[in-house]
Structure formats: C-alpha cells, structure tokens
Image (tube, coloured by chain):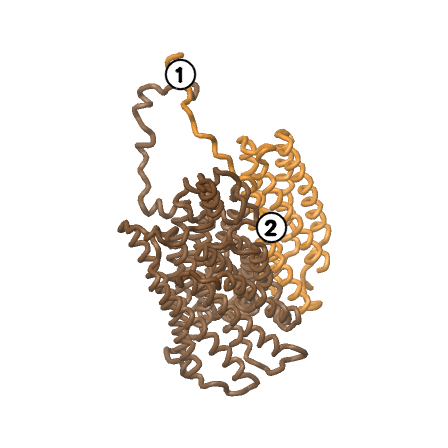
Amino acid sequence: MALTETRPETEAGGDVHAEQPAPSQIERLIGTGDHLTNGRLLLGFALVLGTLSAVGLGLAALDRTTDDGLLGGISDVLWPSSLVGLVLMGVMPLLLALGIAVVPLQVGSPSIAFPRAAGLALWTWLIGALLFMTSVALDGGVGGADDEAARLGNLSIGVMMAALALAAVCVATTVASHRPLGMGLARVPFFSWSMLVAAPVWILSLGAAAAHLFVGHIADADAAGLAANFDEGVSWFLRAPSVHLLAIPVLGIAADVVVHLTGRRLRPYGAFQGAIAAYAVLSFGAWTQVPAARQTVLWAAFVLLAALPVLATLGGLVDALRRGGVSALASLGASLVALLLLLGVVAAAGVQALDTAGSGQLWDLRTDLLGDAQLLFAVGAALLGGLAGLAHWSERLFGAPAADGVAKGGAAALLLGGALAPTVLLVEGIAAGDGRDGLPEGLVHGLVAAGALLLALGVLAGIAAMLGAARQAYDGVEPAGDGPRGMTLEWSSSGAAIAGALHEGPVRSPYPLADLRDGADEETK
Amino acid sequence: MADTTTAPTKLPPPVLPRRRELLFGTGFATAGLVMAIVTLIAHYLATRSAAGASWLAENDIPLTQPNMQLVTLAMSAVTMQWAVYAIARDDRYHTYMALGITLLLGVAFVNQTTFLFEMAGITIDQPEGPLFYAVTAGHLAMVVAGLVFLVLMAFRALGGQFSSRQPDGIAAAALYWYACVGLYAIIWYAVYVQK
C-alpha cells in the first residue's frame, strides 16, 4: 500500500495517537524545548539558589566575627562554598536564563538553538547545584573536611560548569545562526551581542577550570588534597581578570535598557559593540592559572584596562540620557550603578597590581581579601544587571511588567550589599597588610555579613518582582500600554508580529521595529 | 484503487534546518573541550618540570606506538576531509566510504591507545598517574565521543539529511575530529616525545 492510499477501516478506527497516554504537566515541563519556559525556570532556580548562597556567605561572615567561630566554626566550608555558589548557582545561571529567554526574541527566532540541549543544561545544572548543597551540608563543598563529601562537592562543581557551558553554547549559537536576513553581527541587539561575546569566554574559562576538577577527581584525592587542588587550579576563576566575565552581559543589558527608555538610536553602534567585545577579551583569565602570572605587567594591564570599556559604555549611555525625558525606572538605575560597581573590581585589582609591582610585594597586602573583594564587586554588579534585565524584559518573560517599587528596593539592597561587603574587604586587605592588625575582626566580618545579607535581600526582591509579574499575567491584568515603544524585535507583540516585521524586508539597522514605525510614519505623511 | 487514493492536501512548506547551526554549536563546544585538554597538558608539563628526572622513571613508554597513533589520526584527518569534499559535491558513495574509513581509523586509534596504556604500565596510584591519564584518557574519551558523533552523522547522511545544500553535519563532525587530531599532535610531542 502506498503512503498516499487511505487506510482500511479497521486501521483507521484505531487512532494510534489517541491510545498513547498524554504526558503529564511535570513531564511536559521537564521535556520542554520552549526557550521561554526553560528561561523562566532557570531564572527562578537561579534567584532562589543565589539567595541561599548569599545567606550562606552572610552566615560564614557572622561565624568569623569571633575567634572561636560564632556559629561553631562553619566558615571554613561555608565561605568558599558560598562564593562558588554565588557564581555558579546565582550569577551565571541568572544571566544565562535571561539569554535563553530573551536572545531568541531579540534575533527574531522562534526557538533557541538546540532547545533540548538547553533543557538538558537546565536540569543538569539543577542536579549539580542540589548535589553541591548536599555536599556543603555534609562538610564537603569547597574546603570541607569530609573526604566523600568533598569529592561530591568537586564532582558537583564540575557538573554545574559543564551544564552552564552547554547553555552558553545554545545561546551563542542562537545569535550566530538564527539571525534573520539583513541582521549582520553589527546589527545584533546589545544584549544578544554581549551574550555572543561572553559565551566563548565562559566556555573557555569553564573548560579550563573544569580540567583541574577532573584531575582532582581521578586522583581520588582526600578532602585536603581537593581543597589544595581547588586553590591552585580553580581559584583564578574567582579573581580578576576572570571575575569580569560574570558582568559582560551587564553591559549589553544596560545599553538595551537605555535604548528602550530613551527611544534613541545609540551612535556609533559599533563603538558600543566594540567596548563590550573589548571588555570580554579583557575578562579572559585562564592564562592566570599559575600564581606567578598574577604578578606580571600583563596581568596589571589586563585588570586596569578593563576600566576603559566600562567607562566608555557608561559615558555613551549617560550621553544618551542627558537629553532628559526618561523615566527613572528600576531597570535603568540598576543597570547603570552595576557599571559603577564594576569599577570597584578594577580598584581592588589595581591595588593588588600596585602591590605586586616590581620585585616582591610592595606593601605585602592581604591578596586573599583583595581577591574576595574583586569577586564580590563583580557579583554585586552582575546581580544588579540581572535584576535590571528581569525588570526590563518582565513583560516579555512573564506577560506583565514587574512592580517597579519592588525592583527599586531590590536594586537598592543589591547596591548597598554589593558595595559594602567588598569595600570592607578591600579596606581590610590594605589595612591588615604587612603583618599589621588591621581593623577589628568583629567589625570587618559583621559589615561583610550585613553586605551579604543585603545581597540576599536584593535577590529576594527579584523573586518577588518575578512572582508579582507572573501573578499579574495569570490574573489577566493588561499592561498600561503607555510605556516606550520598543525598537528591537523582542518588543513585537507576538511571534507573528516579528514574522510580519521581517516580511517587510531584510533588517536594515539594529532597530528593526523603529525602522518599521518610521517607514509607516513616512507613508502616512 | 483510484477512488481510495487521495492527493495530498496543501501542505505547509518544509522547515529547513538552520544553516550552520550545528557547525557553530560544535565549534563552541569543541573550543571548551580543547581548552580543558590544553589546560591539562599545561598542568602536566608544569608538574613534570617540577618533578625533574624522577618523572616516569619507573615506566617505559616506547615511541613507536605513539608515532603510529599519530600517523593513524593524520590519515583519518585526510579521510575526514574527503567526506566533507564528497558531500559538498553530492557524491554520496564517496561520503559513506570516507566516513567508514575515518571510523575504522578512529577505532584503530582507540585500540592502539589501550595497547599503549598496557605497555606503559602506569598505575593511577603512582604520582604521575592521575595527570598522565587525565591528559591521555581525557583525549581518548574525546576521540570516542568523536566516533559516536561520526556514526550519528553517517546515519543521518544515509537517511539523506545531508547534501551539498546542507552539509553542516559532516562539516561539524569534521571540525570536532580535526580538533581531536590537533590535540593528539600536541600530546604526542609534550607527553610521549619529551617524556
């Protein structure tokens, strides 16, 4: 029987599809390839786990306020594990979640590249994160004393890194190959561009860090050996210049927010793209794995030059804003102050660079504290950028805008926490150098704990904003509709509208929707 | 029979796969894997340099075997490029043949590597063991993954999914395979020649 023939009655009567059980809601959720669903899930999990990591950091700092450990001496495990948690369970998945959800919309694609791989990355990352938290609870994690739990911690960090790298592959491939006709790389929206240039740096850096975890694992090292392996092989990932990689997408978010709120075309577009790309290049730090590499002129140049693209972007955005008429929304404030916090990373790394100038150490500063300050400045900036992105694209992500007051409160908490904790560590790193006593221990760690808990509060506000928007959309509350009209494709009202916009012809500028409106305006004149 | 035959109704146009999606994805993923192996090699070299003359003093690693492995992989790079060349010209017969020979050479490389491991007698408990196997077995795992990739792409080619208009799968597998070959050339010199 040819395939074009009608099936006999007996076969036609039994509908094969009707006999198959329909997948349950949970099965559909786990197996979905929808980029918005996967992005929302990753966003939610990242915010929850980021909050837990910030709380863990606060508890570790509280524990250090007394010599014998206020909370029973848990800080040896909790401090380094929380720092790793903030990066791998909070910041990176948060920004990747925005990438998974928003990038396909920005480039006018109905889906993300390799949608099943993106789903796999999400669930693998979640399993890795849960294993990591289990290992921390069992005195493993990073720096723990229990051998088996430490091995579990080592493995789980590797699993999270592999999953995040896979998600980055999906996002970068979407930008590289899913663009519509006419949208060359020079016309990609800023956030998508920042994800495109961030992804290779993330993939390479995660690959290099995971290699050391692999060695530790096959060596079957004990807890002390794994801690030493992490310190020697992976700690560079949490220090300048690598910490800047956490914040590459923040530059793109800030630029897109300004474009949207001002309704102005940023010029020269290539200069902004160049600044973001330069920042990505300067955040590549896999070459600093050997400690000696962090005492070179090249290292000093890398960490100091990182200020230039940040300042260039900030200057360009402020120039676009200075003509006024822009609503002071949370997304705008959060993304701009995030850029200011990035200058804190440069300051902390610059002090370290000065200290290591010449032969030996100039002032013998506490580089461990300076390193933690660099990381926390970058984490604060990235969380602020993530919150800005969440508030900015909330309507696209959840169907309703995020409550601006909640987002502003969260941004304020993140700014305070993201500035307080690393500034205290920076000051203590200088004050306690060369064998000096430094500031009172209780004061330093108390302030750091306050900063960390403020970070947790800020991320919690992000969760509240997300849930509030989702609730509004569920209740069917219509957006006010008096906001600025979007200029890039993600602001089309639907996928059909995107297709309609692209049907008009190839993309002619980085602002296809603005072009479409301008064309329509000219036709009506 | 004519009344039971139905003409197909108006169907939506077929959705063509995104051009170069697989190629870009493979490129990004391969970059991460290459970085991991290069990091392991650098770690190996730094540790060996610190250990001095005692490094692998108890083991005998013949050079003939690694040389043959290098030649095997070099030949597979040629046959892989043959497959890319053939599919770009819709020469399906040569594509299958080239992919088959590449797979055969890849399996031969795996066989040679396990034989070398047995000859060298390096145990995971000795100080050199973890790093030696992290580098060489890590690369071996990469090659095995490449073989799986090749098999999948070969089946898709057999299914008619690739042609001169859509050669991405074969090109992506080739990109990954060249990375495996290039990495082995580094390992051959850094680990086996300079032992």
> What colour has chain A?
brown
Seen at 62% across and 45% down, the residue is: B175
B136 sits left or right of A108 in the view? right
- Residue A152 in view, yes or no: no
Circle 1: residue type: Thr
Q: Tell me: B160 left or right of A144.
A: right
Tell which of A235 and A76 is nearer to you: A235
Please rate how many residues cluster around mark 1, counting C-alpha atoms within 10 Å: few if below 14, some from 14 to 19, many from 20. few
**Viewer can see residue B71:** yes
User: Which of the chains bears the disc numbered 2?
Assistant: B
Helix, strand or loop status at disc 2: helix
> Which label is found at residue B5?
1
Where residue A231 sits in the image (x, y, percent)? 54, 70
Q: Is residue B91 above or below residue A92?
A: above
Chain shown in orange: B
Residue A16 placed where, x, y %?
Answer: 33, 30
Residue behind mark 2 = B140
- Quarter-of-image position of residue B86: top right
